[in-house]
Image (cartoon, helix red, strand yellow):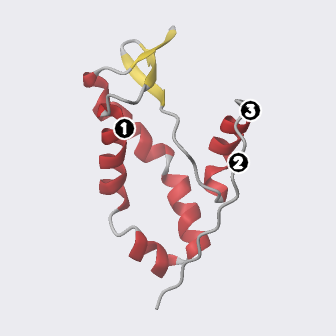
Amino acid sequence: MTVVIRDLEDADVDAVVALSLGAWAPVSASFGAVLGPAVYRHLHPDRERSQAAAVEGVCRDPAMRVLVADEDRRPVAFVAVVATGGDPGHAPARRTHEAAGSTPLPLVRCYRML
């Protein structure tokens, strides 16, 4: 089987959304561990639906270039470079950005349930 890197097509969007939900499950778990369950649920009451909508939005944004790794006419991976998080779940994304020459900007956001 040969993997081909190509531009995203409209027919790929559902598969890319499904890939993203699986790929970012560890990030969500990391956020939950860092923030605690109450704060996490308050900030992300419906993570899967909002994530699916965000990824679909990126895929359909004419200003974005989204590439897919295609194996037998089926997307098996994708990339759309957007800013990433500082939690442990985003560590692989940060390494990818840094390997490409990006410089991270330290940013702190503080959360607390009131």
Tell me the residue that label 2 is attached to: 104
Q: Quick one: label 2, few (<14), some, or many (20+) residues within 10 Å?
A: few
Amino acid type shown at disc 1 = Val
Q: How far apart are the alpha carbons under marks 2 and 3?
A: 11 Å
Q: How far apart are the alpha carbons under marks 3 and 1?
A: 23 Å
The disc label shown at residue 58, or none? 1
The mark that comes first in sequence, 2 or 3, is 3
Name the residue at the bottom extreme. Answer: 114
Name the residue at the left extreme. Answer: 11
Q: Could you tell me which residue is drawn at 69 percent across and 52 percent down?
A: 105
Q: How far apart are the alpha carbons under marks 1 and 2?
A: 22 Å
Question: Looking at the image, is 60 positioned above or below residue 67?
Answer: below
Amino acid type shown at disc 3 = Ala
Q: Could you tell me which residue is drawn at 56 percent across and 74 percent down?
A: 35
Left or right of residue 95, residue 21 in this image: left
Left or right of residue 86, residue 75 in this image: left
Provide residue 56's location: percent of width, then percent of height. 31, 39
Q: Quick one: label 3, few (<14), some, or many (20+) residues within 10 Å?
A: few
The mark that comes first in sequence, 3 or 1, is 1
Amino acid type shown at disc 2 = Pro
Provide residue 69's location: percent of width, then percent of height. 48, 20
The disc label shown at residue 99, or none? 3
Q: Which quadrant of the view contains residue 75?
A: top left
Q: Could you tell me which residue is drawn at 47 percent across and 73 percent down?
A: 40
Question: Looking at the image, is 23 positioned above or below residue 59?
Answer: below
